[in-house]
Image (spheres, helix red, strand yellow):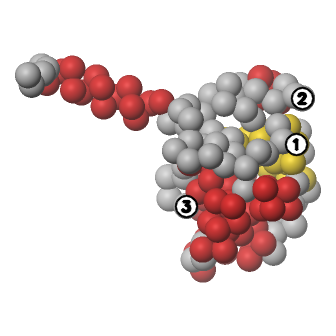
Amino acid sequence: MRLILPLHAYALLLLVFSVVGCQSAPEKPVASLPEGQVSQQQVSSLMSHFAENYRAYSASEQELVAAQQLQGKSLLILFGGWCHDSQREVPRLLKLLDEAQVSLAMLQLVAVNQQKQDPEGLSRVYQLRFTPTFILFDGETELGRIVERPTLSLGEDLAHLVAMSLATK
């Protein structure tokens, strides 16, 4: 027996699946990543997907130039080791920062569990909804966020946040 649904039911199902994002269990098991603040070395050594995606990524010249706008800024990255968007975007950002030789005031990597919580409560403080979330700061001032994936590229989107903050001053 074949189930036939009205067109709006298919649209609703598509919407639900697209909104869920990184909320489901991973397709294959990943190594255990401690929750809370972690180092780039911990991420690379414990998460094979992260290390593979870091090696495979190559930033464009345009992204490298754009990333220079991040000099002296701070980044808070809230991510899930179980999340496919995090597995793709976090290594790309780390490689971009390394290749562009950007000197940040602070880089904070915070791993959250599947309930999007961490021991320090940063996910609650910054109202984390989707992973990864990249939050850019200038001092104590939040300049903006990239949630799940960039619009253009990580470097260009972050540089745009810096430019927008300068335009409003």
Residue 29 in view (yes/no) = yes
Q: How many marks?
A: 3
Q: Is residue 83 left or right of residue 9?
A: right
Residue at which label 3 appears = 153
Q: Are marks 1 and 2 in contact (CB under 8 Å)?
A: yes
Residue 93 in view (yes/no) = no
Residue at 60% across, 74% down: 56
Identify the mark nearer the N-term, 2 or 3.
2
Q: Residues within 10 Å of mark 2 (few under 14, many from 20)?
A: few
Given residues 97 and 111, the one toward you in this image is 111
Tell me the distance, in whole angstroms, between the alpha carbons under discs 2 and 3. Answer: 29 Å
Q: Is residue 65 above or below residue 27?
A: below
Residue at which label 2 appears = 120
Identify the mark nearer the N-term, 1 or 2.
1
Where is residue 30 drawn, in percent x and y?
66, 49
Residue at which label 1 appears = 37
Q: Is residue 168 left or right of residue 59?
A: right
Tell me the distance, in whole angstroms, between the alpha carbons under discs 1 and 2. Answer: 8 Å
Residue at 56% across, 47% down: 28
The amino acid on which the numbered mark 1 sits, given as a three-letter code, is Gln
Identify the mark nearer the N-term, 1 or 3.
1
The amino acid on which the numbered mark 3 sits, given as a three-letter code, is Ser
